Image (cartoon, grey):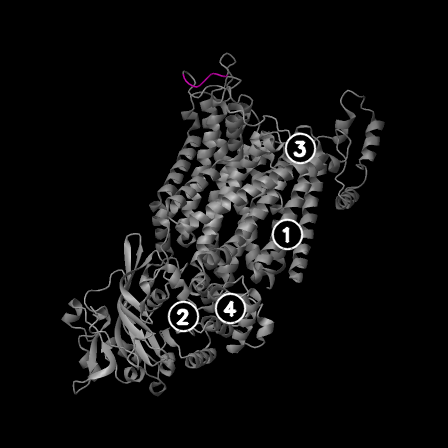
């Protein structure tokens, strides 16, 4: 699919003029224009971006969009089928499902973005230290990364949440803590390869200082792929958060949240399927949005990969 | 457009057909909506025991022509749109793939530029050499290994018996290229195509590898097509030269004549850009401009935008490859040029 | 090769020690007083009983000593005693681990067969309708998380069609749905990985060499292309297998599969800390071990790693 749009051709012996991105720091401006152009030429990537924009807008405008208070119970109107006053029906406590779905996007966006931000911050700082200083700094940080990497995401997160109690903050922190290692490893290996590139040697030969080389040459060229990877991981974090809540170890059970909604609908499978199908759909669309965006960004950054 | 009539007649010394003859070959690469015209009517021939050097910049179509001869074009997107290739009198482009495959490696073999990337990293060199015998002669793994050791000895790799199970990355660049040569020679083919065989090597090693190749060629009386952009390499080993530009042959000549008196401005430019000891201190000559974009080859002579002698006709008419004659009007054997003003070039 | 293994084993020890430190910390900071749990609520909170229980569980000793004891026991496979049944954690979890392993093996088998073949076909027929549909389907599959996929599977094949039992009884039949649920996302990822590595290998110079040698298509495909493409796929599958063995919490919960993932969730509901820590320990240990195996396999497949 995406290949049709962004795939480069085979190595036809074309003249060198059509190969962009060969000199990373020389023509940054036109390089970014190139990336933007390739990204928007990819229809699926644009679809992904659109999904995410809609998701974020829904989260921001939830109070305006939601017809009811997502927490307000109405015991006279429980388990109502979709239609009528409640477009997507009500749950076992008579809470409006559509309103809960809309408010659920807030948890998804907040947890998804915040946990990746936590992971990226830790990962970039530690990965940069390891990659640039090497020696024992590298060893210590990478062994620490190994330790955190050894915990499967959900299992590690559960441990932290059991320590901190349920809630949005524990979920954000736990998902961040068990994802930084991947980013740190990626950044470190990027730095190691960028450090050996000719333009860095050239900068050094021209007498650029150590910190200038890091700031101006190595980091900008290594961080990009980490950020792209981080973007596609927002979807993974959202799914993980919903899964934790589904398992009863995420946010509080009464909070309007997609995993909670699916969990609440589980007992009504085959009877009141609307209770879990709509939140499921919301999760799938969100996850797909981030996958498409991530693929699009990756292909736009490095068309050779596809 | 080069036609068959004007193509250099290159019958073998005894009057029989040449070992290999390429006639009016055209190759295109089609990627989505852009078409790259890599080869646009190439004619050349090689006899047994003869060395033809094909000279040109990257993108001139010299490698693509070679791949078309071997039948290893990336296809798609590459496609032979026109032309014929005769090998020992047989039109190999009309052969079924299975017959074609039997020729490859056995009767015609290729040596690639970068031995490290051209050898499979996860298989031992002995295995990769032995594969030739297993695929074409049905030898057992053990017999093939013995042959591999023999071959490695043949190309003078020290301690062949101990190193036969080593992997490509454990060898030096020169040794790796020797292994590539050994692989090409394994079944004593009639034709070898060497695509920039020494470009990736150190200068000192280059000479050794080139000498080895030339020596083995003489020994087996093979035809050799030596693809290169390095005029220095050519002078020592080639019998004749074909200069390519933008997918066409612009000049052919016996090697020493070409050096003495080029009949095409492009060839002259190449010769002038060789650094020479007797011109130390002078600025080095360089052909101005860039190689042509093969998706938009300029009308007329493809070289015209870079040619100091270009006139109006050069921008409109494609020059044919015509025989070059001496002052007395007799054809100079083996010489042809695709320049409207070859006479001026030759004599100027 | 020898030095490589030794270095990797050294790293493994560091990782395991670090992980146990984290786990040990959890064991003692986790809320819910284990002793209160066992002493029960109705039984008189006799201080003597509590003290006796503290002693029994070694909770009266300094933390450093407790950590030493904990690691010492861990080495011998002793995961402590569980709070609710007073049985060794290892004994409780062993059959559950076997169940989880069955599921993991089944799922990985599906990944290999479906994932690799789809990836290979897509790469060989690049841009064909097969390739385009494979990319479409795998992208979609990756977007459907286990919680959704499991629910859908159960709704369709258990509730609607009645093909499989609702409560897993450990039989092969009851294993199909959870295994397929586990396998789908990974199979899709394997297919994409296999496709992209294979496309890369197809472009490699040594494949061109193989063609120029006059080898048959079969030989080129199996010996030169697949052999090189398989390396990253093996790595991925190994890590994925490690994750599955560590307990597929969601899938086991949805299908009531009596593995260590379900045990973890049940233990959380019962505040049964030794089981929680036991499961996490097993999960981490298996993952780390599998990583080592993958590294060794990698070295065996790629001589460049082995000898550097």
Front of the two marks 4 and 2: 2
Gap between marks 4 and 1 measured at Cα: 33 Å
> Which sits in the foreground, A271 or C24?
A271
- Callouts 4 and 3 close, C-beta under 8 Å: no
Under circle 4, the secondary element is: helix
**Residue that label 2 marks:** B107
Instruction: Judge whether residue C42 is colored magenta.
Output: no
Chain letter of the residue carrying label 3:
C
Read off the chain for label 1: C
Query: Do discs 3 and 1 belong to a common subunit?
Result: yes
In-front residue for pair C130/A169: C130
Is there a contact, CB below 8 Å, between mark 4 and mark 1? no
Residue C71 seen: yes
On screen, residue C12 above or below B196: above
Q: Secondary structure at mark 1?
A: helix
Q: Give me the disc on residue B129.
A: 4
Instruction: Determine the image quadrant of residue A13.
Output: bottom left
**Counting residues from the N terminus, which is met first, the one under dot 3 or under dot 1?**
3
Q: Position of residue A133 (x, y in %)?
A: 57, 59
Residue for badge 3: C263
- Mark 4 residue crowding within 10 angstroms, few (<14) / some (14–19) / many (20+): many
- Magenta-colored span: A79-83
Gap between marks 3 and 1 measured at Cα: 26 Å
- What residue sits right under mark 1 in the picture? C292
């Amino acid at each position: 699919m995406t290949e049709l749009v962004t795939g480069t051709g085979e190595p036809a012996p074309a003249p060198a003029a059509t190969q962009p991105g060969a000199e990373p720091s020389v023509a940054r401006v036109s390089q970014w224009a190139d990336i933007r152009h390739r990204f928007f030429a990819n229809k699926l990537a644009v679809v992904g971006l659109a999904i995410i924009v809609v998701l974020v807008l829904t989260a921001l405008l939830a109070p305006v969009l939601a017809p009811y208070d997502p927490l307000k119970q109405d015991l006279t109107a429980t388990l109502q089928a979709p239609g009528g006053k409640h477009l997507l029906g009500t749950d076992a406590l008579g809470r409006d499902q559509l309103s809960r779905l809309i408010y659920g996007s807030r948890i998804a966006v907040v947890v998804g973005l915040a946990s990746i931000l936590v992971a990226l911050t830790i990962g970039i700082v530690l990965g940069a230290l390891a990659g640039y200083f090497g020696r024992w700094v590298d060893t210590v940080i990478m062994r620490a990364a190994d330790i955190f990497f050894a915990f499967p995401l959900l299992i590690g997160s559960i441990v932290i949440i059991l320590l901190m109690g349920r809630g949005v903050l524990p979920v954000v922190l736990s998902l961040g803590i068990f994802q930084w290692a991947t980013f740190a490893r990626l950044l470190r290996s990027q730095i190691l390869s960028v450090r050996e590139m000719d333009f860095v040697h050239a900068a050094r030969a021209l007498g650029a200082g150590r910190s200038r080389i890091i700031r101006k040459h190595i980091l900008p060229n290594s961080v990009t792929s980490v950020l792209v990877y981080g973007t596609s991981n927002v979807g993974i974090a959202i799914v993980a958060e919903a899964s934790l809540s589904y398992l009863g170890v995420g946010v509080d059970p009464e909070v309007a949240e997609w995993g909670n909604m699916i969990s609440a609908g589980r007992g009504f499978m085959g009877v009141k399927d609307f209770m879990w199908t709509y939140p499921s759909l919301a999760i799938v669309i969100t996850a797909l949005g981030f996958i498409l965006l991530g693929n699009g960004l990756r292909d736009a950054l490095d068309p050779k990969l596809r | 457009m080069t036609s068959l009539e004007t193509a250099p007649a290159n019958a073998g010394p005894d009057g029989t057909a040449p070992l290999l003859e390429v006639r009016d070959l055209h190759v295109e690469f089609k990627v989505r909506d852009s078409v790259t015209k890599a080869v646009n009517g190439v004619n050349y021939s090689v006899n047994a025991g003869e060395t033809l050097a094909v000279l040109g910049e990257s993108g001139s179509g010299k490698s693509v022509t070679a791949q078309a001869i071997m039948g290893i074009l990336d296809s798609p997107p590459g496609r032979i749109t026109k032309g014929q290739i005769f090998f020992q009198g047989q039109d190999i482009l009309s052969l079924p793939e299975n017959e074609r495959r039997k020729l490859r490696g056995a009767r015609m073999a290729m040596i690639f530029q970068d031995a490290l990337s051209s050898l499979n990293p996860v298989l031992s060199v002995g295995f990769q050499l032995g594969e030739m015998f297993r695929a074409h002669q049905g030898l057992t793994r053990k017999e093939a290994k013995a042959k591999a050791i023999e071959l490695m000895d043949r190309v003078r790799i020290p301690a062949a018996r101990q190193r036969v199970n080593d992997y490509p990355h454990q060898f030096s660049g020169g040794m790796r290229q020797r292994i590539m040569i050994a692989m090409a020679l394994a079944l004593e083919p009639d034709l070898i195509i060497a695509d920039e065989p020494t470009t990736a090597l150190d200068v000192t090693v280059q000479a050794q590898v080139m000498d080895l190749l030339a020596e083995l060629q003489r020994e087996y009386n093979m035809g050799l097509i030596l693809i290169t952009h390095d005029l220095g390499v050519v002078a020592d080993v080639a019998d004749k030269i074909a200069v390519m530009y933008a997918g066409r042959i612009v000049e052919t000549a016996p090697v020493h004549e070409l050096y003495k008196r080029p009949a095409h401005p492009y060839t002259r430019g190449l010769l002038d850009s060789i650094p020479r000891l007797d011109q130390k201190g002078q600025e080095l000559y360089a052909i101005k401009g860039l190689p042509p974009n093969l998706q938009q080859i300029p009308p007329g002579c493809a070289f015209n935008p870079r040619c100091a002698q270009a006139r109006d006709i050069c921008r409109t008419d494609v020059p044919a490859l015509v025989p070059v004659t001496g002052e007395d009007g007799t054809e100079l054997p083996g010489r042809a040029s695709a320049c409207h003003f070859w006479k001026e070039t030759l004599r100027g | 090769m020898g030095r490589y293994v030794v270095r990797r084993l050294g790293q493994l020890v560091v990782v395991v020690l670090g992980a146990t430190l984290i786990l040990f910390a959890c064991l003692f900071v986790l809320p819910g007083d284990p002793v209160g749990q066992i002493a029960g609520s109705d039984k008189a909170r006799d201080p003597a009983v509590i003290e006796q229980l503290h002693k029994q569980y070694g909770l009266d000793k300094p933390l450093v000593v407790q950590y030493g004891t904990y690691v010492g026991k861990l080495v011998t496979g002793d995961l402590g005693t569980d709070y609710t049944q007073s049985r060794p954690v290892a004994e409780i979890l062993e059959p559950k681990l076997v169940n989880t392993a069955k599921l993991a093996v089944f799922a990985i088998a599906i990944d290999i067969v479906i994932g690799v073949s789809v990836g290979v076909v897509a790469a060989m027929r690049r841009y064909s309708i097969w390739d385009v549909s494979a990319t479409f389907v795998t992208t979609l599959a990756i977007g459907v998380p286990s919680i959704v996929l499991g629910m859908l599977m159960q709704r369709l094949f258990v509730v609607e069609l009645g093909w499989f039992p609702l409560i897993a009884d450990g039989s092969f039949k009851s294993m199909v749905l959870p295994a397929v649920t586990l396998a789908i996302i990974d199979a899709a990822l394997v297919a994409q990985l296999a496709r992209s590595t294979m496309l890369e290998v197809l472009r490699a110079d040594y494949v061109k060499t193989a063609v120029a040698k006059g080898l048959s298509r079969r030989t080129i495909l199996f010996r030169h292309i697949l052999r090189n493409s398989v390396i990253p796929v093996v790595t991925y599958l190994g890590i994925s297998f490690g994750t599955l063995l560590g307990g597929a919490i969601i899938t086991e919960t949805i299908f009531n599969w009596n593995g260590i993932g379900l045990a973890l969730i049940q233990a959380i509901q019962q505040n049964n800390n030794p089981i929680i820590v036991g499961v996490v320990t097993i999960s981490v240990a298996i993952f780390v071990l599998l990583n080592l195996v993958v590294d060794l396999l990698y070295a065996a497949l790629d001589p460049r790693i082995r000898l550097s």
